Amino acid sequence: MRTRIATSADLAAIHNLLAHASRQQMHIGGEDIEPAIERGRFLLLVRSWLDNGIDAAEELLACLVTAVDVDSVQLSASQPVRSYVRGLAFARQISPTTALQQLLHAFAQSAARTQPQQLIAYSSEKWLDRALHDAGMTLAERVDYFALERLQKRSWHAAASVSCIIRDATHTDLNRLVALDSRTFDALWRYAWRQMWDAWVNGPMLTAWIDGELAGYAALTVDVEVCTIVRLAVDPAWQGRGLGRALMTASLQLAQEVGCTRVILNTQATNQRAQKLYRAFGFRQTGESFAVFVLDLPVNSV
């Protein structure tokens, strides 16, 4: 068995693998496969048969699809470049753990790194938890989902201890939002500029201001009657002043105005402070969760 980067000639074999895989978790659509191949982000595990020393046939056993933060190059040299596992698929004749071990080894050796790199994988399946762990990735956190039902029958009163102005985010706020996000969250969770752009485009997005300074924000999405609070962040300098509660209240009131009946969100299982706030508003755990695994790769000179 060997690994190699996929080319456009592999497209039919990749679609066949995805159609008949024994195990898979894909976070990209079919229309995204060719662009991922063109960017060299599709890694294949194959078995070849030789005829007189020449490859006569090849069998596709597994694939690994990754994506890198588009603006990671703007980080300081000490910060890791973040890459994400966007897809995994395994043929019936290969163990996911065996395949992952080889794919991750090939990924780690695929290029020289002048900065540390962190590969991040999300898993909502126990079989994938085991495979990622056994292949050498580390469980960084488990994330739990919460839901608020019967939204239209609820009401709240914001009680921030400081006066703040809450308004819709604008395009000109994005750089400041990214800077605030980087101060608020650990490197694993922070938003890159493109992620912030996507959150703004898919909005609504609310911002909280104190004396002309950005102090926090909330990013939402609305799908018919369901609102998802994608992000709720308060600058560490302003935490403990009720701004999180004010932003949550404004978010829920906005969801009510557009006709939502249910609100969902997620947070780290260890983030008891956030969970206390959500429970105070009536959110309850749904029982759904996902795991976050990481593989830290040091600088190399390959």
Image (tube, rainbow, N blue to C red):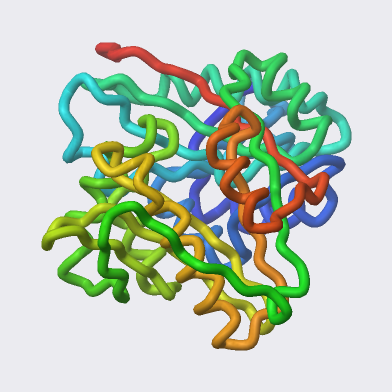
**Quadrant housing the C terminus:** top left
Q: Nearer the viewer, residue 42 or 166?
A: 166
Query: Is 153 above or below relative to 65?
Result: below
Left or right of residue 23: residue 35:
left
Q: Position of residue 257 (x, y in %)?
A: 55, 87
Query: Which quarter of the figure is the N terminus placed in?
Result: top right
Q: Look at 55% across and 71% down and name the residue there.
A: 252
Residue 143 % position (x, y): 64, 38
Indicate whether 252 appears above or below 49: below
Residue 167 position (above or below residue 199): below
Which image quarter: residue 270? top right
Q: How many marks?
A: 0
Tell me, yes or no, if residue 186 can be seen here: yes
Can see residue 58? Answer: no
In the image, 264 versus 196, the foreground residue is: 264
The x, y position of residue 174, in whole percent, is: 22, 61
Q: Residue at x 63, y 78 (%)?
A: 223
> What residue is drawn where x is 60% and y is 81%?
256
Residue 225 left/right relative to 181: right
Among all residues in the image, which is located at the extreme left? 212
Give left or right: position of 285 versus 238: right
Q: Where residue 237 sits in the image (x, y, percent)? A: 24, 38
